[in-house]
Amino acid sequence: AQSVTQLGSHVSVSEGALVLLRCNYSSSVPPYLFWYVQYPNQGLQLLLKYTSAATLVKGINGFEAEFKKSETSFHLTKPSAHMSDAAEYFCAVSNTNAGKSTFGDGTTLTVKP
Amino acid sequence: KAGVTQTPRYLIKTRGQQVTLSCSPISGHRSVSWYQQTPGQGLQFLFEYFSETQRNKGNFPGRFSGRQFSNSRSEMNVSTLELGDSALYLCASLRDTFSYNEQFFGPGTRLTVL
C-alpha cells in the first residue's frame, strides 16, 4: 500500500519569498513521485516527477523537489514566489503501475503582494 | 498535439438519475484513468482502463463503472446518483507503462447532484 501526507493544507508566502511545500510518502516498493498544480476549475498540470534517475528534480516554472529516501520526503521548493504561483498543489505517489496514483490532500498556496 | 478532453464540462442531475461522462485521451495514449475530486475526500482513484480492459479499480461502489473503446476513448457511468456523487471527475491518459510516463489530466467534468 502507498500513501502521501502533505503537511499544511494552507501555506501563505510573500511575493519573492521562498516557497516550501512538504510531502512525505509511504510505499512498499521504490516509488515514483509527482507534484501537480491545479488552478481553479482546471485539471492537474504536472510540475515535476521523480523516477529514480536523480534525487534533485527540476520542474517547470522554477520549481524543484528533492527525493530523500531516509526521510521518505519529496518536498517542493521555489526560491522566489510569484503571484501566478497561487494555486493548489498535490503530491502523488505511484508504484510501477503508472495509471494509478495516490494523491495527498493538497496544499493551497497563497502569495501575498 | 491535442490534450485530454472531457465532455461535458458541467452537468447537473437529480438523485436517482444516471450519468455518463466521456474522456478522449491524447492521441497514441492507451491508458485512461478516472479520479473523483471532492473537498472532503480529495482526489480518489476510480479505475484505469488499458487497451479496453480494466486494469485497476479503486474502492468505489458498483454504481460506478467504466469502459474503454478501441480508439482509447473512455466513458464512465454512475447509476442511481446520490448527493455525495457531486464532484469534479478527472480523467488522465498515459501512453503506456513499458517506459515510465506521467499521466496527463483533462480539465474535468463537474457533476452536481441535486
Image: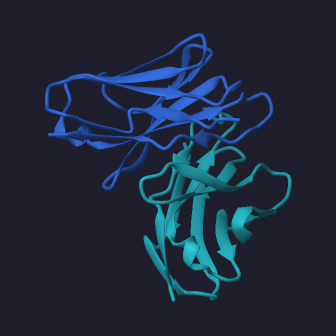
Q: Is residue B33 left or right of residue B75?
A: right
- Residue A105 position (above or below residue A31): below
Which part of the image, by quadrant, shows the C terminus of chain B? top left
* Residue occupying the far front of the picture: B2
Residue that appears at 73% across and 71% down: A62
Q: Position of residue A46 (x, y in %)?
A: 64, 53
Whether residue B99 is visible, yes or no, is yes
The colour of chain B is: blue
- What letter labels the chain drawn in cyan? A
Q: Is residue A43 left or right of residue B59?
A: right
Residue that appears at 69% across and 44% down: A29
Q: Position of residue A16 (x, y in %)?
A: 64, 88
Q: Is residue B106 left or right of residue A62?
A: left
- Residue A83 position (above or below residue B68): below
Which part of the image, by quadrant, shows the N terminus of chain B? top right
Whether residue A99 is visible, yes or no, is no
Residue that appears at 66% across and 22% down: B30
Q: Position of residue B4 (x, y in %)?
A: 58, 35
- Dividing the picture into quadrants, the one containing residue A81 is bottom right
Q: Is residue B65 left or right of residue A25?
A: left
- Residue B3 position (above or below residue B71): below
Q: Position of residue A92 (x, y in %)?
A: 58, 52
